[in-house]
Image (spheres, rainbow, N blue to C red):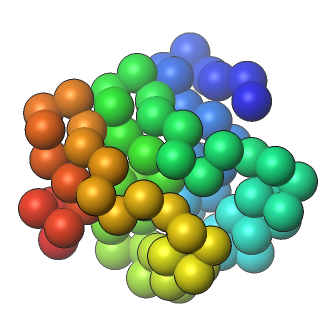
Amino acid sequence: MKKDKDGKTVLHIAAYNNSNETAEVLISHNANINEKGEDGNTAFHIATRNNSKETTIILISLSANINEKDKDGETSLDIA
Protein backbone atom coordinates (compact mmCIF):
# COMPACT_ATOMS: atom_id res chain seq x y z
CA MET A 1 0.00 0.00 0.00
CA LYS A 2 1.30 3.45 -0.86
CA LYS A 3 2.27 5.85 1.88
CA ASP A 4 1.99 9.62 2.09
CA LYS A 5 4.93 11.97 2.69
CA ASP A 6 4.71 11.22 6.43
CA GLY A 7 4.83 7.45 5.89
CA LYS A 8 1.15 6.88 6.65
CA THR A 9 -1.12 4.56 4.69
CA VAL A 10 -4.80 5.14 3.97
CA LEU A 11 -5.54 2.67 6.78
CA HIS A 12 -3.52 4.81 9.20
CA ILE A 13 -5.52 7.87 8.16
CA ALA A 14 -8.80 5.97 8.56
CA ALA A 15 -7.72 4.95 12.08
CA TYR A 16 -6.81 8.54 12.94
CA ASN A 17 -10.23 9.75 11.79
CA ASN A 18 -12.15 6.87 13.42
CA SER A 19 -13.42 5.83 10.00
CA ASN A 20 -14.19 2.27 11.03
CA GLU A 21 -16.15 1.42 7.89
CA THR A 22 -13.30 2.64 5.69
CA ALA A 23 -10.81 0.63 7.73
CA GLU A 24 -12.94 -2.48 7.38
CA VAL A 25 -13.21 -2.07 3.59
CA LEU A 26 -9.47 -1.46 3.23
CA ILE A 27 -8.63 -4.57 5.24
CA SER A 28 -11.14 -6.65 3.28
CA HIS A 29 -9.22 -5.56 0.17
CA ASN A 30 -5.93 -6.84 1.62
CA ALA A 31 -4.56 -3.73 3.33
CA ASN A 32 -1.88 -4.87 5.77
CA ILE A 33 -3.55 -4.38 9.16
CA ASN A 34 -0.17 -4.35 10.96
CA GLU A 35 1.80 -2.17 8.53
CA LYS A 36 3.93 0.43 10.27
CA GLY A 37 4.45 4.03 9.31
CA GLU A 38 7.82 5.77 9.47
CA ASP A 39 7.17 6.43 13.16
CA GLY A 40 6.67 2.71 13.79
CA ASN A 41 2.97 3.10 14.47
CA THR A 42 0.37 0.68 13.17
CA ALA A 43 -3.26 1.62 12.55
CA PHE A 44 -4.02 0.15 15.98
CA HIS A 45 -1.46 2.46 17.66
CA ILE A 46 -3.02 5.43 15.88
CA ALA A 47 -6.59 4.45 16.74
CA THR A 48 -5.63 3.93 20.38
CA ARG A 49 -3.80 7.27 20.66
CA ASN A 50 -6.73 9.13 19.13
CA ASN A 51 -9.52 7.46 21.12
CA SER A 52 -10.94 6.02 17.91
CA LYS A 53 -13.01 3.49 19.82
CA GLU A 54 -15.05 2.05 16.95
CA THR A 55 -12.01 1.64 14.73
CA THR A 56 -10.05 0.08 17.59
CA ILE A 57 -12.80 -2.50 18.02
CA ILE A 58 -12.82 -3.27 14.28
CA LEU A 59 -9.03 -3.64 14.20
CA ILE A 60 -9.07 -6.03 17.17
CA SER A 61 -11.88 -8.08 15.63
CA LEU A 62 -9.87 -8.36 12.39
CA SER A 63 -6.77 -9.62 14.25
CA ALA A 64 -4.60 -6.53 14.57
CA ASN A 65 -1.49 -7.35 16.56
CA ILE A 66 -2.13 -5.54 19.84
CA ASN A 67 1.40 -6.37 21.02
CA GLU A 68 3.17 -4.70 18.08
CA LYS A 69 5.75 -2.15 19.26
CA ASP A 70 6.34 1.31 17.83
CA LYS A 71 9.81 2.83 17.34
CA ASP A 72 9.89 3.73 21.06
CA GLY A 73 9.17 0.13 22.06
CA GLU A 74 5.61 0.89 23.17
CA THR A 75 2.58 -1.24 22.43
CA SER A 76 -0.91 0.19 22.11
CA LEU A 77 -1.62 -1.18 25.57
CA ASP A 78 1.25 0.94 26.94
CA ILE A 79 -0.32 3.99 25.30
CA ALA A 80 -3.88 3.35 26.48
Percent position (x, y) of residue 65?
42, 59
Q: Specify whether 67 is left or right of 74.
A: right
Left or right side of 3 for 70? left
Could one spot residue 43 in this view of the protein?
yes
Q: Residue at x 15, y 61 (%)?
A: 79
Q: Can residue 16 be seen here?
A: no
Residue 17 rendering spot, x and y as whole percentages: 55, 62
For the N terminus, the quadrant is top right
Q: At 62% from the left edge and 22% from the top edge, which residue is drawn? A: 4
Give coordinates of residue 43: x percent, y percent.
49, 52
Quadrant (top left, top right, bottom left, bottom right) of the C terminus: bottom left
Q: Residue at x 51, y 22 (%)?
A: 7
The picture places residue 36, in percent across and down from the top left corner, at 46, 34
Residue depicted at 57% across the width and 81% down the height: 61
Residue 67 sits in which quadrant? bottom left
- Count the labels in the image: 0
| Above or below for 37 versus 43 | above
Task: Give the farthest residue toward the top.
Answer: 5
> Closer to the camera, 46 or 17?
46
